[in-house]
Image: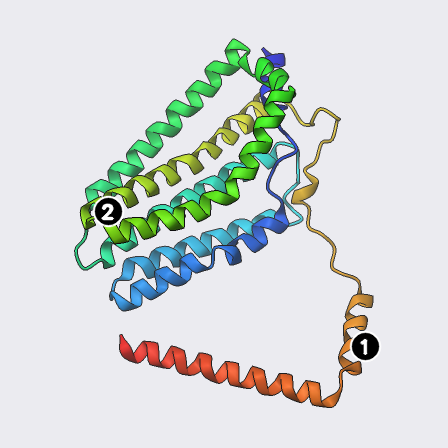
């Protein structure tokens, strides 16, 4: 049985989330918190403001705990981090969907609908984990590992990686088509299907919790090469001071006129941003 478990755990151990990615992830999706804050202020609703504040607080607590020196960056920790990240992202889109519904002039769903989404998400996760455990007992992952190295599998992986960038463009054109030709009911239905699919697809990351469980149960503390740590989760040392000195030299080399021009541009940009925020608040 332990050999079957190792085939499952060693299916793809090198692809895991790094600490540096977790630190910048919040800023990459910052548009979502900003949208929720604007929706909360404009719609005079507390839910978007409170929910995104709680989500943000929990996120940074998670990151700070992870980068702490007291937390050992063990091999199995990578699976736990991957699973927790999936929960965070799924919950982010879930509260975003609820917030959009609450601030809408004509709410398209009741609260029970979102509770049903949560219930089915938990049910889906339980079934998904049960299927993974069944596959482990049947020894299916050893066959998957063998076939994943074939030329056909590698070719299909390359094709899908090439098609992924086009998904965003197709989504934009689909949205334009729906706005131009579809009724509001159809738009709401498409949006509901899209949000639910997104939440559930991200929920596939919960399979990492099964890997973490098996690591603990069978005492698997290293990868195929014998590495017992997760280097990507280690805190990177700060950049050397020589880089800062180089930047200071570059600044000193800039002509006085260039520095004055940069200062003027930054001042105008700050004034414009301040006036924009004031005008936006007054218009609410």
Percent across and percent down for residue 84 are 49, 40
Q: Secondary structure at mark 1?
A: helix
The crowding category of the residue bearing disc 1, from other C-alpha atoms within 10 Å (few below 14, some 14 to 19, many at least 20), is: few
Residue drawn where x is 56% and y is 16% of the image: 141
Can the viewer see residue 165 in this picture?
yes
Percent across and percent down for residue 103 are 24, 59
Can the viewer see residue 88 in this picture?
no
Q: Which residue is mark 1?
A: 249
Q: Is residue 242 above or below residue 53?
A: below
Q: Secondary structure at mark 2?
A: helix
Question: In the visual, does 201 lie left or right of 223?
Answer: left
Q: Nearer the viewer, mark 1 or mark 2?
A: 2
Q: Please tell me in which quadrant of the rendered image residue 34 appears.
A: bottom left
Between 163 and 200, the residue placed more toward the observer is 163
Q: Please tell me in which quadrant of the rendered image residue 245 appears.
A: bottom right
Q: Check if mark 1's residue and mark 2's residue have beta carbons within 8 Å.
A: no
Percent across and percent down for residue 64 are 57, 53
Q: Is residue 187 above or below residue 226?
A: below
Of the 4 image quadrants, the one containing the C terminus is bottom left
Tell me the CA gap for discs 1 and 2.
56 Å
Color scheme of the displayed model: rainbow
Percent across and percent down for residue 102 are 23, 55
Between 75 and 106, the residue placed more toward the observer is 106
Q: Which residue is mark 2?
A: 188
Question: In the visual, does 103 lie left or right of 279?
Answer: left
């Amino acid at each position: 049985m332990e050999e079957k478990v190792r085939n499952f755990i060693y299916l793809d151990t090198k692809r895991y989330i790094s600490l540096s990615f977790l630190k910048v992830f919040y800023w990459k999706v910052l548009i979502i918190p900003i949208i929720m804050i604007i929706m909360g202020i404009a719609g005079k609703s507390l839910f978007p403001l409170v929910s995104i504040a709680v989500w943000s607080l929990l996120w940074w607590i998670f990151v700070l705990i992870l980068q702490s020196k007291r937390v050992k960056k063990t091999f199995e920790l990578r699976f736990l981090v991957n699973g927790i990240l999936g929960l965070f992202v799924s919950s982010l889109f879930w509260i975003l969907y609820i917030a959009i519904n609450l601030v809408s002039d004509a709410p398209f769903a009741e609260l029970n609908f979102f509770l049903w989404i949560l219930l089915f998400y938990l049910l889906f996760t339980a079934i998904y984990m049960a299927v993974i455990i069944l596959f482990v007992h049947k020894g299916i992952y050893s066959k998957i590992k063998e076939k994943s190295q074939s030329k056909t599998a590698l070719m299909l992986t390359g094709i899908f990686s090439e098609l992924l960038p086009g998904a965003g463009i197709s989504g934009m054109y689909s949205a334009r088509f729906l706005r131009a030709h579809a009724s509001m009911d159809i738009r709401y239905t498409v949006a509901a299907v899209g949000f639910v699919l997104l939440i559930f697809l991200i929920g596939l990351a919960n399979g990492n919790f099964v890997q973490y469980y098996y690591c603990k149960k069978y005492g698997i503390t290293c990868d195929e090469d014998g590495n017992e740590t997760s280097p990507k989760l280690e805190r990177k040392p700060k950049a050397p001071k020589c880089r800062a000195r180089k930047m200071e030299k570059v600044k000193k080399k800039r002509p006085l006129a260039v520095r004055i021009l940069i200062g003027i541009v930054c001042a105008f940009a700050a004034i414009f941003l301040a006036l924009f925020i004031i005008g936006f608040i007054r218009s609410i």
